[in-house]
Amino acid sequence: MDKQPLDFSLAFGSAVHDVKNSVGLLLHSLDEFMSANPPQSEEDNHRVVVLNYEASRINNDMMQLLSIYRLENDRLFVSIDEANVQDFVEDELLAHDTLLKMKKIGVDVQCDFGLNWYFDTMLLKSVFNNVFVNTIRYTKDKLRISVDCSGDFLCMSIEDNGRGYPEALCKDPGGYLTRINFNTGSTGLGLYFAARVAELHENEGRQGYIEVDNKSTLGGGAFRIYLP
């Protein structure tokens, strides 16, 4: 009997889904353990921060790979609905509360309580998860999240007081294939995914987009996503 050829894309999608679920369970277990057993020394705290960061990064990469797989295979369905922006931001902060506290990072939020907008909350959550985790890693001790309406777009930005983004990345934040560097471990997958998610948001001929630069009001890098 002839063997059926392996559908690699299907196997890849299934494997990514399984890994994502496993890492998500590990993160949840780590948070529960840390709540019951806070670090007793700076060395222990550092180890937990590293574990939390690396597990979060893997989880985010898996979520993005799964979404990109679905997008490339016409299986990613965008569900745009009205949402309160401040509630969305506060939920994201709560999801990263453990890491923020461990690294002693102060967060300033500027957002109108009554501001509602239309977007896919799950896709935008994946974007923010990645940006948050990386920003928490590279900032010194401050983050600023601001939301405002710029023309016909909602602008959501995350700023830090770290060393900033590389110049090449600022010029082409969505250019994933042009920035893969296996020596440094940098792929730009997160920003590529963010750019694709932004583009999936369209309204009356206007399409979403992202910006990355080092014009942060805190002196570091700034990520912005614009949604029509």
Image (cartoon, rainbow, N blue to C red):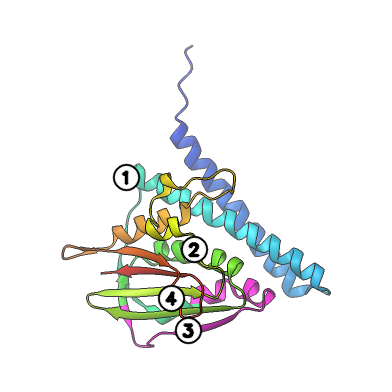
> Which numbered mark, 3 or 1, is in the foreground of this view?
3
How far apart in space, not on screen, are marks 2 and 4 (Cα)? 25 Å
* Lower position in the chain sequence, tag 2 or tag 4: 4
**Residue 223's image quarter?**
bottom left
- Mark earlier in primary sequence (1, 4): 1
Circle 3 SS class: strand
Residue at the location (70% across, 66% down)? 49
Residue 122 lies in the magenta-colored region: no
Q: Quadrant of residue 133?
A: bottom right
Identify the magenta region. Answer: 91-116
Q: Which residue is mark 2?
A: 165
Q: Is residue 150 left or right of residue 85?
A: left
> Which residue has dot 1 on it?
74
Residue at x 35% of width, y 55% of height: 196
Judge depth for marks 1 and 2 and give the one in front. 2
Pointer 2 with pointer 3, Cβ within 8 A: no
